[in-house]
Amino acid sequence: MPPPGASKKDELFRRSDVLSIHLILSDRTRGMVGERELNMMKKTAYLVNTSRGDLVDEAALLKVLREKRIAGAAIDVYGVEPLPADHTIRKLDNVLLTPHLGYVSVENLSRMYRDAIEDIIAFLDGKPVRVLK
């Protein structure tokens, strides 16, 4: 049972073995995972971020990873992209880093290419589709 006054977000951070972030970046969500939230996580927990780098306070994440206060992180997005070659996070042994390709799947790429071809053909026929207004 969560402590009195604990939010559902707090409970999520306390109880999760793997916490995967899936949010858009906005003024409201920027930095929403900070030192407080990371310190609530289990020592055996993992953080996964394939959404936007700035959702997580990078300094706080580096601190908990260096101090092994969580088991590790899998990160696909960064505050600065591409991730600089000399970035501190690259030196940690409890991090899996990928180059902002978490959205890639066979299904996703197939749809993107199919839609692109449909867009070109429709445009050439004088009947554009998916027109932004």
Image (cartoon, rainbow, N blue to C red):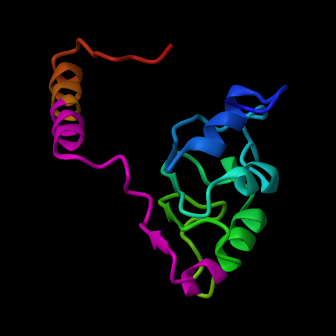
Q: Give the range drawn in magenta.
A: 88-114
Q: Where is residue 69 in the image (x, y as percent from the top left)?
A: 67, 69
Q: Is residue 123 above or below residue 100?
A: above
Asked if the stretch drawn in magenta spans residue 113, the answer is yes
> Image quadrant of residue 29?
top right
Q: Where is residue 133 in the image (x, y as percent from the top left)?
A: 51, 13
Left-right relation of 2 to 78: right
Of 81 and 65, nearer the camera is 65
Left-right relation of 103 to 12: left
> Count of labels shown?
0
Q: Is residue 28 above or below residue 31?
A: above
> Image quadrant of residue 80?
bottom right
Q: Where is residue 40 in the image (x, y as percent from the top left)?
A: 72, 51
Q: Is residue 2 above or below residue 105?
A: above
Of 89 and 127, nearer the camera is 89
Of 123 and 22, nearer the camera is 22
